[in-house]
Image: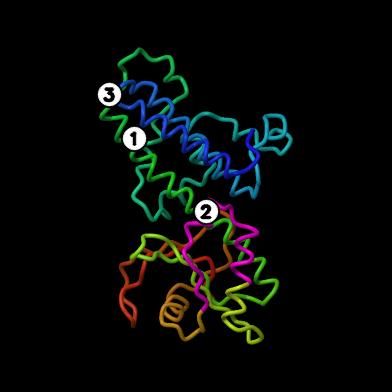
Amino acid sequence: MFKSMVELRERAWKFLESARALCESDPDTAAYLGGYSLELMLKQRYASIKNWTDLPGVDVIKARGSREILSHDLNELLVLARAEVLKSGAMLDVEWDMIANWTVDQRYQALGSQSAGKVRERLNGLERAFHQLADFALLDQLQDVESKVRDQVGPFRFLALVRNHETEGWYLLASSKSADFTCEQIGKRILASMVEVVDHDLCSSVAFVSVQPAQHPLVKACVESFGIEPLDRGSHVMIKSSIVIPYGMLPDLYILTSD
């Protein structure tokens, strides 16, 4: 069992690091460890969608009515992790079918069944997938932040996780409908809620929070172009930078609220 999602992600990354270390000298073991690392990350995704804070033991999982998460089949786990969202909503280029081509029975294959070159390719794909899955986990927890702050200051007009292309990191762009709180006050409440709600390994990827009025060009363009209904946990709207708006090119972003 894992007591937290942070612990689960850390274990998956350690398996991936171990696989990289063995890739040249023992590609068979490296391939097995790589597949197992993806199994853990997909189970983390499932747990995040379910709003679990841990991945408990078998008996507790069964008691929660989630026996299906005990599977070792990566394709089954992809379905549980909402494969359609993973494939259509990923910002990064991830070959999900390629990296999921693994079974737990590979440990019984003859030595030399795996080539270092093929395993290295899969491990590179796994690393991209892990970064993408971490972004999805961050989005799920930012939905909790949005809900918490909305209860304090009223509904948001816009909330999005935006790519900062200078640093390749993220920042959170928000705009509130409230006339009772300043942008600075709302920003402080968002930051406080993030510290309380978002896992530390995910929170560190958000460089800053920017709260802007409705007239801000990016806020205005997105609200006018991408009005969306409230989203279920595990869902988001991904926009890649291919649309021109009044102040320039639209950056990569995930929209959480646009109304």
Q: Which residue is drawn at 35% across and 40% down?
A: 125
- Three-letter code for the amino acid on which mark 1 is drawn: Arg
Residue stretch in magenta:
189-211
131 sits to left or right of 27:
right
Q: Residues within 10 Å of mark 3 (few under 14, many from 20)?
A: some
Of residues 93 and 10, the one drawn nearer to the viewer in this rendering: 10
Q: Nearer the viewer, mark 2 or mark 3?
A: 2
The quadrant where residue 221 appears: bottom left
Residue 39 within the magenta-colored segment of the rendering:
no
The residue that mark 3 highlights is 115
- Please tell me which of labels 3 and 1 falls first in the chain: 3
Residue under circle 1? 122
Find residue 238 and report its horizontal and vertical position in percent.
43, 61
Determine which residue is flagged by label 2: 202
Q: Nearer the viewer, mark 1 or mark 2?
A: 2
Q: Which amino acid does label 2 sit on?
A: Leu
Q: Which of marks 2 and 3 is nearer the N terminus?
A: 3
Instruction: Report the label total.
Output: 3
Frontmost residue, 150 versus 49: 150
Alpha-carbon span between mark 1 and mark 2: 24 Å
